[in-house]
Amino acid sequence: MARASDVDDLVRLAREGDPRAVARLISLVEDASPALRDVIAALMPFAGNAHIVGITGAPGVGKSTSTSAYVAALRARDLRVGVLAIDPSSPFSGGALLGDRIRMQEHATDTGVYIRSMASRGHLGGLSWAAPQALRVLDAAGCDVIILETVGVGQSEIEVVGVADTVVVLLAPGMGDGIQAAKAGILEIGDVFIVNKADREGASTTSRELRHMITLGERTAGAWVPPVLQTVASRGEGIDEAVEKIDEHYAWLKDSGTLAQRRLRRARDEVEAIAVASLRQRMGDLGGEELLSTVAAEVAAGSLDPYAAADRIIASV
């Protein structure tokens, strides 16, 4: 178990740019270490400065290639970059498959880039449960921009909007992505839409469909209107314009006060999640599972209403 003094040393080294210290802190987060509270408390004074960009999209649209091109553009501006790639879990070890590290080897030796793959471990939202805390580690370590690349996107995989400042949705022509985006609710979460592999047939059609669907949504005066861009990330085409639009969105967030609102909502959700998890753990420690089974049986039998049952559970904790 890491002691408080060890945690302070790790945080200091991470802020000095030591990649091993950053890796150790993220591992403590991912493993739900008993030192997790000390880790987060030590990080808090240094966090809250990075622009968190979520990149999501269906498998095969070129997320990792686009991320790599985006990292290169940011490094050309001498910005420190963190990449948190949420990989599908290995069915054997439960660990990340590390595909994103393999595809981003060109940045592996760059001390201004930190790349970490995390296993989703079956978590439905496309994110690992530990991702928000891992983002805080990278933020406190001095990253100017943190890129969060998710497993994929679908009906239940839109949690990225809860942890990112700017959400970039990648699509590709010929995959029916325009229609799928509307069905999956992706139009509501995207701040920037990018049709990658735009050298393929159908790119213009996909872009046109997306722009049309975006115009159908109701917006208040001064609201951000998501742009629809085209890129060929494998050749670096269109990346500069994409970076420009992502920067424009971040500037709009700050000027409009939306950034503060999003981060307040994020903090509320995080505190609520921790409180609920603590309540569940306390129930287990106090034998609450047995009481839960008892009151559940009474509810099922019709002798107790669910609200009264919940009151009994809460009163026992």
Image (spheres, rainbow, N blue to C red):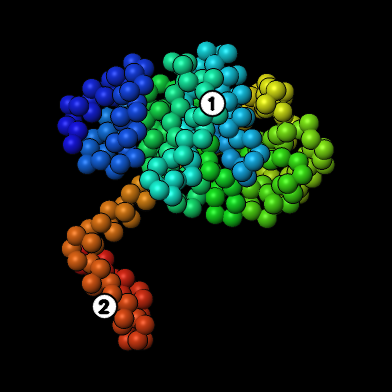
Name the residue at 44% across, 24% down. 114
- Classify 82 as above or below 161: above
Secondary element at image label 1: loop
Name the residue at 32% across, 86% down. 303
Q: Which mark is residue 284?
A: none
Name the residue at 54% across, 20% down. 106
Classify the position of the C terminus by image quarter.
Answer: bottom left
Tell which residue pokes out farthest to the front in this image: 92
Q: Nearer the viewer, mark 1 or mark 2?
A: 1
On the question of residue 221 being in view, the answer is no
- Classify 152 as above or below 200: below
Query: 223 or 302, which is in the foreground?
Result: 302
Q: Residues within 10 Å of mark 2 (few under 14, many from 20)?
A: few
Give the x, y percent position of residue 72.
58, 19
The reply to whether discs 1 and 2 touch (Cβ–Cβ < 8 Å) is no
Q: Residues within 10 Å of mark 1 (few under 14, many from 20)?
A: some
Name the residue at 42% across, 34% down. 135
Q: Which residue is mark 1?
A: 104
Query: 283 or 261, which is in the foreground?
Result: 283
Give the x, y percent position of residue 143.
44, 22
Q: Quadrant of residue 206?
A: top right
Give the x, y percent position of residue 36.
26, 39
**Count of marks overlaid on the render:** 2
Query: 292 or 127, which is in the foreground?
Result: 127
| Position of residue 78 in the picture relative to residue 210 (left or right) | left
Marks 1 and 2 sit apart, C-alpha to C-alpha, by 53 Å
Classify the position of the N terminus by image quarter.
Answer: top left
Give the x, y percent position of residue 98.
47, 35
Q: Amino acid at mark 1?
A: Met
Q: Which residue is mark 2?
A: 294
On the question of residue 111 being in view, the answer is yes
Q: Amino acid at mark 2?
A: Thr
